[in-house]
Amino acid sequence: MDDVTLGFTLIGVMVALIIMGLPIGITLISTGAVGVWLIRENPDLAFRFTAMATYSGIQDYLFATIPLFVLMGLLVSISNVGRDTFEVAQALLHRVRGGLGMATVGANAVFAAVTGVSIASAAVFTKVAVPEMVRHGYTMRFATGTVAGSSILGMLIPPSLLMIVYGVLAEVSIGAMFIAGIIPGLIIAVGFVAMIWAYATFLPHRIMTADAPASVTERVMPASEMAAKAVPIMALVALILGGLYTGFFTPTEAGAVGAAGALVIALVRRQLSPGQFWRVLKETGLVSAAILFLLIAAGLYSRMLAMAGVPQAIGELVEHLGLGPYGFLAAFVVIILLMGMILDSTSILLIMVPIGAPIAQAMGFDLVHFGIVVIIAVEMGLLTPPFGISVFTVKATLADPRVGIETVFAGALPFVAVMGVSLVLIALVPGLATMLVR
């Protein structure tokens, strides 16, 4: 068996093992090590290669970005910042058609800019926004679908853990990825708002219950209270993105500054007891260790693929078939969408980026632009059955036996459609992802 055939065989074995339930990290590192062993016919070399990948895979200063942004996101989550952001958005938009849905999208977009984790957004706004929307006469399908759909902004609007993972795997500047995500994230958020407005204006029966109240008495929020609720989160967003955009500090330094700012907010709001702080630190360690182990495993896996010549073989096949750059991109996105039905976002990146990034670069794609397209496609997988982790997060957080998982999936489908249109637009117009980077 030649090296290329062996490489493809190991990819098939890896996918089979994942479907059988073996953890993604163990699968990647084991198939990578076995692949090096079989390609070089030297078990000692495979063990040395694995040890080298373990050491060199995460020794760079850049990897401190991961625990720092995880810590910042957890501190923000326990500070009730998400609730306050939604209340401000609700006060501003409650008189607009579909205003509460728009408020959820807007609050999620702001919350995403400091947490970078879609699941955190889904959990927070399920508790905050869904009961309020139902009280105002919105259907449960629309309320839960809006929360699940808008939660994906957490991985697109920077900072984002997925962008960090992609930047490491594709060897692209994480700061450039953060900046590149701003306009695509805003495009998708505006698309969500436009879709909600269209439903509320032309098809209100699709989002409102038959017995929806004509009006609900709202407490007028004073400007001073609005400012008190909005200033902390907006200041943190401006601090992080402003520092990155101006080049005042690196992504790692941005993580440290953001974590410090989130700690100050939590302390000032008196939301952080010693016990809670210890739990946050433990969870930060657990999450960061899991991500770093996955990156080590993916590093070994990508080196094995390069050693076997798999990316080069796929590139030659694409050229032979005459697909062209955008034909390859379309096929790659379709594969990611299919994988999103059975795998989580990080796992998809770990498996597909080592294969796709070298081919995309050889075909003339800017890897920053390619990364934004890939991340949007991966995020769509958070909303598609049967996996749909954001949908399951909403269902689990809601804890209402009367609301089935199919209700949340149905409510999220219009948001998947908006993301699909946005993905095509951003793929065809690379400048939407790269204009701020240049």
Image (cartoon, rainbow, N blue to C red):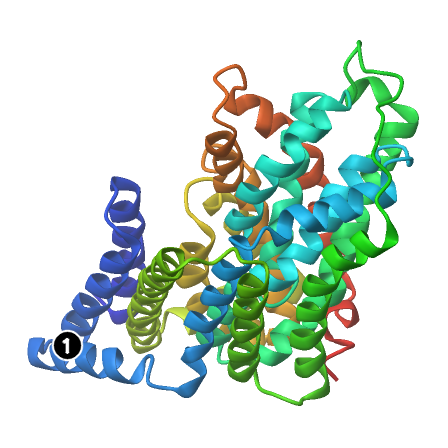
Q: Please state, as top left, top right, bottom left or bottom right, where the C terminus lies in the image.
A: bottom right
Q: Quadrant of residue 150?
A: top right
User: Disc 1 marks which residue?
Assistant: 46
Looking at the image, residue 115 sits to the left or right of residue 179; the answer is: left
Q: Residue at x 68, y 62 (%)?
A: 233
Picture mark count: 1
Residue furthest out toward the top: 211
Q: Residue at x 32, y 80 (%)?
A: 57
Specify the amino acid type for callout 1: Ala
Where residue 336 sits: x, y (%)?
51, 51
Indicate whether 248 appears above or below 91.
Answer: below
Where residue 330 sits: x, y (%)?
62, 55
Where residue 61 sits: x, y (%)?
41, 87
Looking at the image, residue 89 sits to the left or right of residue 55; the answer is: right
Whether residue 330 appears in this view of the structure is no
Indicate whether 59 appears above or below 306.
Answer: below
Looking at the image, residue 37 sits to the left or right of residue 411; the answer is: left
Q: Please state, as top left, top right, bottom left or bottom right, where the N terminus lies in the image.
A: bottom left
Whether residue 197 appears in this view of the structure is yes
Residue nearest the viewer, comparing 412 with 394: 394
Indicate whether 174 appears above or below 75.
Answer: below
Residue furthest out toward the bottom: 248
Residue nearest the viewer, comparing 84 with 160: 84
Residue nearest the viewer, comparing 116 with 94: 94
Q: Residue at x 29, y 65 (%)?
A: 7
Q: Quadrant of residue 346?
A: bottom left
Q: Residue at x 81, y 43 (%)?
A: 193
Where residue 67 sits: x, y (%)?
41, 71
Q: Secondary structure at mark 1?
A: helix
Q: Quadrant of residue 38?
A: bottom left
